[in-house]
Amino acid sequence: MSPLPLEPDDDNSTNPNGAGMRKGLTSYGDRGFSLFLRKAFIKGAGYTDAALDRPVVGIANTGSAYNPCHGNAPQLVEAVKRGVMLAGGLPMDFPTISVHESFAAPTSMYLRNLMAMDTEEMVRAQPMDAVVLIGGCDKTVPAQLMGAASAGLPSIQLITGSMLTGSHRGERVGACTDCRRYWGKYRAGEIDAEETADVNNQLVASVGTCSVMGTASTMACIAEALGMTMPGGASPPAVTADRIRIAEQTGAQAVQMARDHLTIDKVLTPAAFENAMRVLLAIGGSTNGIVHLAAIAGRMGLDIDLHALDRMGRETPVLLDLKPSGQHYMEDFHAAGGMAALLRELKPLLHLDALTVTGRTLGEEIERAGPGFRQDVVRSANNPIYPQGGIAVLWGNLAPGGAIIKQSAADPALMEHEGRAVVFENAEDLVTRIDSDELDVTADDVLVLKNIGPKGAPGMPEAGYIPIPRKLARAGVKDIVRISDGRMSGTAFGTIVLHVTPESAIGGPLAYVRSGDRIRLSVARREISLLVTDEELARRAQETTVVEPTAERGYRKLFLQTVTQADKGVDFDFLRAPDTVGKVPRA
Ligand code: FES
């Protein structure tokens, strides 16, 4: 057995096995000694020279007791390692930050960029020729794609997969659309505390990500549409054999990518982002998908053109019949053929020449998936769930930089609406007053919540799903127009205007709305307007002192000083690519 060469190598393009363990050496001022020392340490773990001379595949392991959406991470890591070794590589798993929606305060979005930085720097710092990114819960996949895009190595995403659905008193349930529905019933007094406790046991029936088309499922589909997963990698549930097989294939493909030097910039092209936007619209995906796509694109020097996205939306029907826009769950989508079934229907609207991690184009992968079969989860283009894309972009004097509404999950009766503003100054104000019997509110009013944008909260929490005031809920009101500069969970539904840009905390027009003002929402005209004159708005801006939030130290200080607005992905300004090279979708 020949020993691992003692020559360092930072350029794996000259070595068919990649630079592997000889790559990215620690600085001691003597590169030969650096490699000698590294070998000594890794041999302490029992590796042979033959193992150490293989292409190295890093595996970003985001398993955490605080993240049940990644509860299958140990099995996935094992399967990825098997795939890497079967293909002749050396697998090296390493931990990074893991962020779960319910276990991250003040909000998981506050930590997404930290996870992206962790991923980027550990991929860059440690010797590897390719990286497998294991992610699933909402913020983890975008964080990993952002970090990997900046690190620039051959990279492949492995999704943890969705949870199974449960059953409550004969009704199929799943997180988290049904979590909100049952909580709404409890608030309205329709079910008692005992039933609420019962359903709490059934909503999350296994480890894995939320079972509807929330942000996690959206990002899984987007990752596959971007060409960043193995074909069929978006839909297998977390606890299935299909998911484990995808993991093994992912490991094997990562070795091939290392050998072919198939770096992430060859996959994350403008065409790939346009395909991802098309899929986001066609799946009735989470509004958060726009923010995350903008952040990932920003790492490649690309801006998302919201006007063009809206135009795409008008010609892209929602085809996927999943909650909250439809009725099925992710496991049904998988049984119906997964992304291949959807991509086949969308084919005329896609860039089929976009390269994927397999080294083949998206069009070739659609062909390889074969013909479809009869199923009722992915509709045909002439029988859609919703005739336009799930997301519409709004403009007006209330949102000069744009705002978003998920029209496929909104009440059609409210999408052309004018009403009186009922204003909450911030999240605390909302909590204090929303359930008060004294609150002056009717079902025709428009609820406005300020200061939950990127800097305001901070971290742009999913508080945009403002609860129906208790007295209206008890009277049977199911929806009301709501407006904020925050986000909402992809599992939520309602006539809810989000991502108002610029946010109120930095003096956006939302800051100057007062209770009693009239607000007009017209989704047909893509309008969100405060019905006061420009002069009045300017006068209010002059009268009001907006104090931007600051922090004394630490990550919070970095966050508040550098976070961008929703249209730039809420990324840190210094993490974007230094040069902007274009817009997506291209005109
Ligand atoms: Fe993790 Fe929903 S909480 S995917």
Image (cartoon, rainbow, N blue to C red):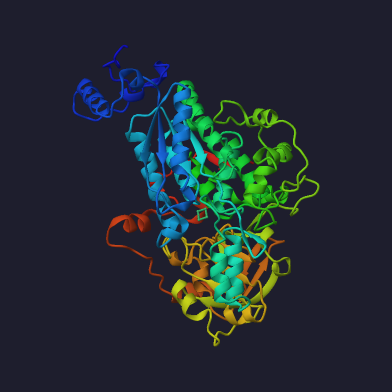
- Answer yes or no: is residue 382 visible: yes
Query: Image quadrant for the N terminus?
Result: top left
Q: Quadrant of residue 586?
A: top right
Residue in the picture at 48% in, 34% down: 79
State the image coordinates of residue 463 (x, y, percent, origin top left).
51, 66
- Answer yes or no: is residue 572 visible: no
- Between 545 and 409, the one lying in front of the other is 409
Residue in the picture at 56% in, 44% down: 220
- Between 115 and 401, the one lying in front of the other is 115
Which residue extends farthest bottom? 438
State the image coordinates of residue 531 (x, y, percent, origin top left).
62, 74
Which residue extends farthest right? 382
Give the side of residue 300 with respect to residue 533, left or right: left
Q: Quadrant of residue 505?
A: bottom left
Query: Image quadrant for the C terminus?
Result: top right
The relative height of residue 106 versus residue 572 in the rendered view (above or below) is below
State the image coordinates of residue 430 (x, y, percent, origin top left).
49, 75
Q: How many marks?
A: 0
Q: Quadrant of residue 575?
A: top left
- Between 425 and 184, the one lying in front of the other is 184
The relative height of residue 472 versus residue 101 in the rendered view (above or below) is below
